[in-house]
């Protein structure tokens, strides 16, 4: 690493929201860890303390956010951004991501999988998480250094790490940490981040079942909805249109999902729901189909308005992807709201039990390559 260098991003991508844990906390941001969209401003923090961040959101020092995009500000030295997950299951896991340096000068970045015990504080400032981290309450489960970040070219990276039974007994946290440096005129970027560590909680969020779809599918009725191949819990329905996989265990084409949840409507009135998809999709609210886009299509958004009372309501979204790009986004606008927003994680009832699921964290590109 180069102490005089800085980290930033030249291409915009989204992260999941940041919770300030060592300073006084404002109203928490509404954001989605799994799919990485912001609906409110980030809170910045130079340190993180294990055990005081129940939402497991990304955060970092010197972050800014505008129009739903989080960017590391130009600063002196290295900076780190992390996500911390409670761990309950021993095993061997894999972290995958892509990285590149936008200029010609070789720069370094380091990715860590750290096991951190409760009460331990990590610094996200200059050299706060070094290659040879030697700090009480911190164990390096795995790490990977990329020199030059494959200058100007995206390169896929991955490494495996082990969570031991002793880690589980200590009720420790897994911290995924990205640390990088760059010159004033160059940026190191990360994208397509995924990790298969199970989430600690088995309740809450949107219960999402994943299915294989038959070749040539052109209707939701063609899916065998009785045989899911994977179940996860998502924190919002927000997969911007892309040609990439949504989940490392599923293909980019010929798949389907069924997402069900209880949504907490904050006030009485007319609510407008918007569902965008490529390909077919359908939205059901309280057992009534409100949006039906059951046909192969490029990404198209349809809306429907429904009068709802304050309190819980059930929703279901069914979707299939044929070939080409894939995307699915659900948003809403309530009475008096100036604009629609992605339905935030805080709107989904966390009391309904759902199966244990895989934590998948993405930074979804919204511009650039």
Image (cartoon, helix red, strand yellow):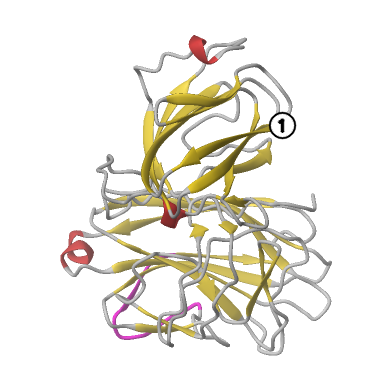
Give whichever of 259, 285 is nearer the camera.
285
Residue 78 found in image quarter = bottom right
136 within the magenta span = yes
Against 357, residue 173 (above or below) is below
Q: Neighbour class for label 1 at 10 Å: few (<14), some, many (≥20)?
A: some
Image position, residue 241 (x, y; %): 68, 39
Give the residue at x 44% y 50%: 235
Against 220, residue 234 (above or below) is below
Give whichever of 279, 246 is nearer the camera.
279
Residue 207 in view in this figure: no
Residue segment shown in magenta: 131-142
Image position, residue 203 (x, y; %): 27, 48
Residue 152 in view in this figure: yes
Give the residue at x 42% y 13%: 224
Give the residue at x 81% y 71%: 105
**Quadrant including the N terminus:** bottom right
Q: Is residue 139 left or right of residue 19?
A: left
Give whichever of 202, 75 is nearer the camera.
202
Give whichever of 74, 353 is nearer the camera.
353
Q: Identify the secondary structure beneath mark 1.
A: loop
Give the residue at x 49% y 80%: 129
Image position, residue 215 (x, y; %): 58, 11
Residue position marked by numbered label 1 in the rendering = 299
Q: Is residue 338 left or right of residue 21?
A: right
Against 182, residue 101 (above or below) is above
Image position, residue 242 (x, y; %): 68, 38
């Amino acid at each position: 690493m180069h102490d005089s260098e800085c980290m930033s991003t030249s291409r915009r991508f989204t992260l999941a929201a940041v919770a300030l844990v060592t300073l006084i906390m404002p109203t928490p941001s509404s954001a989605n860890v799994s799919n990485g969209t912001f609906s409110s401003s980030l809170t910045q923090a130079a340190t993180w303390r294990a055990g005081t961040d129940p939402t497991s959101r990304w955060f970092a020092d010197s972050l800014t956010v505008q129009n739903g995009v989080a960017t590391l500000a130009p600063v002196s030295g290295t900076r780190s951004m992390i996500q911390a997950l409670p761990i309950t299951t021993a095993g061997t896991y894999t972290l995958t991501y892509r990285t590149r340096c936008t200029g010609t000068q070789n720069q370094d970045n380091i990715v860590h999988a750290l096991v951190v015990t409760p009460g331990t504080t990590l610094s996200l400032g200059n050299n706060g998480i070094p290659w040879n981290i030697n700090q009480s309450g911190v164990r390096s489960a795995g790490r990977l250094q990329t020199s030059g970040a494959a200058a100007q070219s995206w390169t896929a990276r991955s490494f495996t790490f082990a969570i031991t039974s002793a880690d589980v007994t200590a009720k420790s946290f897994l911290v995924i940490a990205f640390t990088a440096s760059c010159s004033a005129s160059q940026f190191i970027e990360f994208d397509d981040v995924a990790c298969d560590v199970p989430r600690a909680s088995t309740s809450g969020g949107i219960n999402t079942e994943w299915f294989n779809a038959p070749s040539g599918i052109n209707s939701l009725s063609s899916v065998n909805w009785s045989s899911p191949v994977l179940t996860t819990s998502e924190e919002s329905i927000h997969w911007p249109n892309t040609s990439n996989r949504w989940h490392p265990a599923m293909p980019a084409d010929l798949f389907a999902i069924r997402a069900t949840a209880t949504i907490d409507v904050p006030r009485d009135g007319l609510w407008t729901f918007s569902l965008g998809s490529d390909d077919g999709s359908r939205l059901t609210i309280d057992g009534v189909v409100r949006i039906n886009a059951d046909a192969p299509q490029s990404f198209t958004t349809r809306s429907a308005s429904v009068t709802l009372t304050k309190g819980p309501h059930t929703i279901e979204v069914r979707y299939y992807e044929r070939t080409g790009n894939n995307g699915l986004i659900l948003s809403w606008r309530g009475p008096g709201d100036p604009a629609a927003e992605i339905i935030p994680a805080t709107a989904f009832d966390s009391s309904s039990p759902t199966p244990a699921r895989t934590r998948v964290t993405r930074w979804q590109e919204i511009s650039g390559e």
